[in-house]
Structure formats: C-alpha cells, structure tokens
Image (cartoon, rainbow, N blue to C red):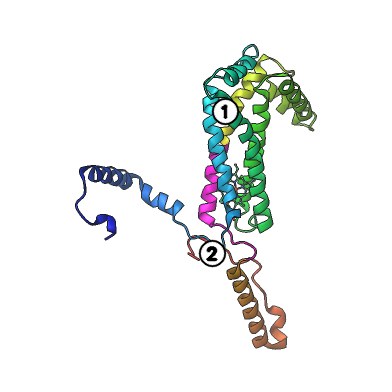
Amino acid sequence: MSTTDIGPKGSATKAGGAVVGHVDHRTGATTGIGWFLKRNIPGETSWFQTLGFAAMAVFGLQAVTGIVLAMYYKPDPTTAYGSIRHITNDVTWGWLVRGMHKWGASAMIIVVFLHMARVFIFGSYKYPRELTWVTGALLLIMVMFMGLTGYLLVWDQKAYWATVVAMNITASAPIIGPYIADILRGGTTFNSDTLSRFYAIHMLVIPGGIATFIGLHLFLVSKLGISEPPWSKRSTRARRAEEAAARAAARQRGPRGRHEVTVDPEPQTLTAEAGQ
Ligand code: HEM
C-alpha cells in the first residue's frame, strides 16, 4: 500500500481515480506512460544529455508562437507584407510573439546542431542507436526546411530574392533538382501560388513530419536507453573486465589455442530492460 492510499478520500479524488482507472483499464495508458517516463539512466548522465529535450522545448515554443502568428498572417502576395507589419506594429504583443518565433528559429537550429555534436562526440550514434541517428538526421533536414519556407513568408525584398536564389540553387541539382524546384514554386517560375505553397509546407507538412519523427526518435531513445558518456567509469570497468577475461581464457588454452580467442566486437550497451 502506498502512502496515497492512507486515509479517507474526498469525492473529487474518488471521481478522478475512477476516470483514470476506467481509461487505463481500456488503454493500458499507465503502463505505456510508465514505460516511457520511468527509465534507468546511466550514473554519469550530465547536462550534455539535456540538449535533445532543449530542442524539443524550442520546437514546442515555435509551434505555439506559430499558431498565434497564423491567426493574423495573410498568405497572399498582395496582403502578406502588410499583415506582417500589422502584427509587428498594431497587434497587442504581436512584436513579441513575432520576435520569439524569429529568434526561436535560429535557436532551434543552433540547439539541434549542439545536440547532434554531443551525440557525435559521445559516439552515441553507434550500435544499437543507428536508427536514432537516422531519424535525427531526417529531423535536421526538416528543421532546415522550416527555416527556408518560413523566410519567404515575410514577403519583403530580402525574403523574395533570397528564396529566388535558393530555388535556383535547388533547380541546378542533377536529375531531381528541377522537379523539386517546380514542386516548391508551384510552377517553373516564382508566381502568386509560390507563397501559399510555402505557407502550407511551413504550417502543415513539415511540422507534421517533425512531430511524427520526434515521436519515433523518442520511442527509440526510450527503447534503447541513453548511452553512457565516453568517460563512464562503469563502462571502462566492464571493458577492462572483458579484456581480462579474454586474456585469462587465452592463457588457459595455451599457445596452440591462442589464435582462436576472440573478443566481442560489440561494446556493452546499456538498455532500460537490463536496468543497469
Ligand atoms: C528536432 C530535432 C531533435 C530533437 C527534438 C531530438 C530529441 C532528442 C532527445 C529528447 C533525446 C534524448 C536526450 C538526449 O540525448 O539529449 C535524443 C537523443 C538522441 N538523438 Fe536527438 N533530437 C533531434 C535531432 C537529432 C539529430 C539531428 C541527430 C543526429 C543526426 C540526433 C540523434 C540522436 C541520438 C543518436 C540520440 C541518442 C543519444 C544517446 O542515447 O545518448 N537527434 N534526441
């Protein structure tokens, strides 16, 4: 019995418990949430391993500020720039929300790069986390595309010409380049549909993709557990013990069997199931 079971329960607590019990009985939500949140992590986990969550937090902020901006933005070549000016100058706290979204875009790219650098330096992309890396790489591409598609939406001279250049670069890529540029522009040249196409991609397509891939990424992180830092004393001890065992086995076999001794090429990995 846990301490929460002690004493009489109020009617609100009882009703809440009944609702949670009802939903849990039919969905198994408590088990799922417990599996996701209650995990063992390596003893030497540090601030470096919080960068992935920081990226997720900035994405959440971009989603919220983006929704507010979408309530005032008008994705039409004749009205887009005016609506941006209206948000900045007239709407209450519009300048703040727009500023947060604009600076948040740069912050997200910086944080994602820092997270990727830590994964690379720690060697966390190695077995068994290759797919976590691949889903992460796809996330990086999508985050960059968010920057490209969002930049045009301001619809001023800088945004317009910078995107014209980006589309020309895209179109110059071999074989598929011209097709991708045509799809993005909604034709062979920049036209009135280009802005609404970029808006739809920026508002719906990529955020949907990013949310899906963050889900996959987190599933893999939960399933495989967070990797130990390279300086982990536990993994150094485990590796030394393995090497010592391999040497002892080689000594026992004598000079003739020595060439048959093999060391497991896969490093010991930490899994949530193993509870290490
Ligand atoms: C929107 C972008 C991203 C988000 C929201 C995100 C989120 C996360 C989170 C929350 C974690 C667990 C905590 C941590 O290790 O920091 C994680 C781990 C990981 N991420 Fe990302 N990530 C993103 C981009 C990337 C990129 C670009 C890569 C590499 C190309 C990547 C590769 C990995 C790997 C390999 C792990 C496992 C690390 C370990 O086990 O120690 N992620 N990610």
Identified at 58% across, 30% down, the residue is: 205
For disc 1, the marked residue is 96
In the picture, the disc for residue 43 is 2
| Residue closer to the observer: 129 or 59 | 59
Residue 49 visible in the shown view: yes
Snapshot quadrant of residue 55? top right
The amino acid pointed to by label 2 is Gly
Left or right placement of residue 272 versus residue 109 in this view: left
In the picture, the disc for residue 270 is none
Query: Label 2: how many residues lie within 10 Å, few (<14), some (14-19) or many (20+)?
Result: few
Identified at 61% across, 27% down, the residue is: 201
Magenta residues?
A: 210-231
Snapshot quadrant of residue 238? bottom right
Identified at 60% across, 70% down, the residue is: 233
The amino acid pointed to by label 1 is Leu
Please determine whether, in this image, residue 222 is positioned above or below residue 109: below
Snapshot quadrant of residue 174? top right
Magenta: main secondary structure equals helix
Residue 92 place in picture, x, y as percent: 52, 21
Residue 25 place in picture, x, y as percent: 30, 47
Identified at 76% across, 22% down, the residue is: 161
